[in-house]
Image (cartoon, helix red, strand yellow):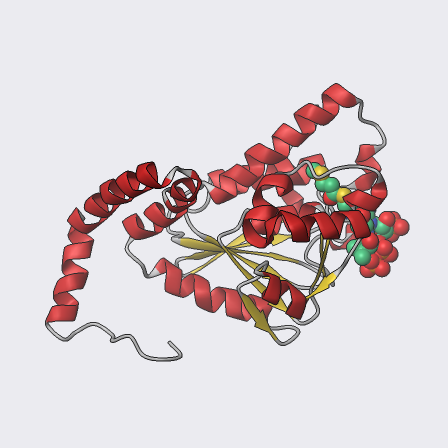
Amino acid sequence: MNATPDLQAVDVTLDGAVAIVRLRRPAKRNALSDGLILALRQTFETLPEAARAAVICGEGEHFCAGLDLAELRERDAVEGLHHSRLWHAAFDAIERGRVPVVAALHGAVVGGGLELASACHVRVADDSAYFALPEGTRGIFVGGSGAVRIPRLIGVARMMDMMLTGRVLGADEAERAGLVQYRVPAGQALAKALELARRIAANAPMTNYALMHALPRIAEQASDHGLFTEALISAIAQAAPEAKARLRDFLEGRAAKVRPGG
Ligand code: 1HE
């Protein structure tokens, strides 16, 4: 694969402690070319030092139209294998990266676009968003980690249905299925994602790290192993000076209480 990162297709800005990563190929509905995939990997591996959380969003009418189908025509089986592994590396740079990532979803979130959203840590959809896996009807298969990450969110049965029948989920159905965690009126996905990312950025870094790196692994461990891993990670997290300071703040009446609707 000879592609180089298409750095024009990904824009990164810093808003306080939140990096905003924008897919910027609207004329092609942010379709994921090889160059864009490489740029995404590079972006998430080299986020600005000051970033403590990130938001990913898409420019134009849609979040992402998935794989760039114009490039698919050219590929043989061996190239297809390496191509899929390239996507895995890029999306791993998101899921197992340095900071939690909130996806702000609108319009089409389809195929590889849904795989990309599934690699993020929290998903917000506005009412214009719709979700599909057209791979089933295009004669191909998911190759960007969807077979692993999407069933974790909605189960094998729902993903099977989407792929076999071409079912398209609206924002409300996606929320009910567990594909997205927040649903907001059309046009408000980015604002909501930013609000959440700012909250996430204010957490102790070790807590965020443990959530990103330990929680998904524990979920895949046998329960006895999972409990042991949990004990190790919680011991490390509570020993951090920042954890001690936060507990002191609460005990001395300086920290926010937990309130309904918070
Ligand atoms: C594209 C792509 C694309 C748009 N690859 N060029 N993904 C799909 O099967 C979804 C294919 N796309 C669509 O169904 C629609 O384009 C949308 C619903 C996303 C948007 O519709 P619309 O009416 O706003 O835009 P459009 O007129 O269809 O497209 C505008 C341009 O973007 C047009 O190019 P133009 O040069 O004629 O202007 C389209 O060809 C182009 N375009 N989507 C290439 N996907 C690792 S495995 C992952 C496997 C998959 O992701 S399979 C699912 C692929």
| Number of marks in the rendered image | 0
Q: Nearer the viewer, residue 62 or 247?
A: 247
**In the displayed structure image, the side of residue 190 where residue 239 appears, left or right:** left
Instruction: Give percent across and percent down for residue 198.
Output: 41, 64
Which residue: 84% across, 38% down? 139
Q: Point out residue 6 in the picture as x, y percentages from the top left corner.
A: 66, 39
Do we see residue 151 in this rendering? yes
Image quadrant in which you'd find residue 201: bottom left
Picture layout, residue 238 above or below residue 105: above
Would you place residue 250 above or below residue 241 in this image? below
**Going 74% across and 52% down the picture, which residue do you hit?**
162
The answer to whether residue 65 is seen in the rendering is no
Q: Residue furthest top?
A: 78
Please identify the quarter of the rendering in which residue 256 is found. Answer: bottom left
Q: Is residue 106 left or right of residue 199?
A: right
Q: Quadrant of the N terminus?
A: top right
Identify the image quadrant of the C terminus: bottom left
Q: Is 161 positioned to the left or the right of 241 in the image?
A: right
Q: Position of residue 20 (x, y in %)?
A: 52, 56
Residue drawn at x 66%, y 31% as measured from the top left: 84
- Please state the horizontal and vertical placement of residue 231, each as a whole percent of the image: 23, 44
| Residue at figure coordinates x 59%, y 50% from the top left | 155
Asked whether, in this view, residue 17 is left or right of residue 151, the answer is: left
Q: Residue furthest bottom?
A: 260
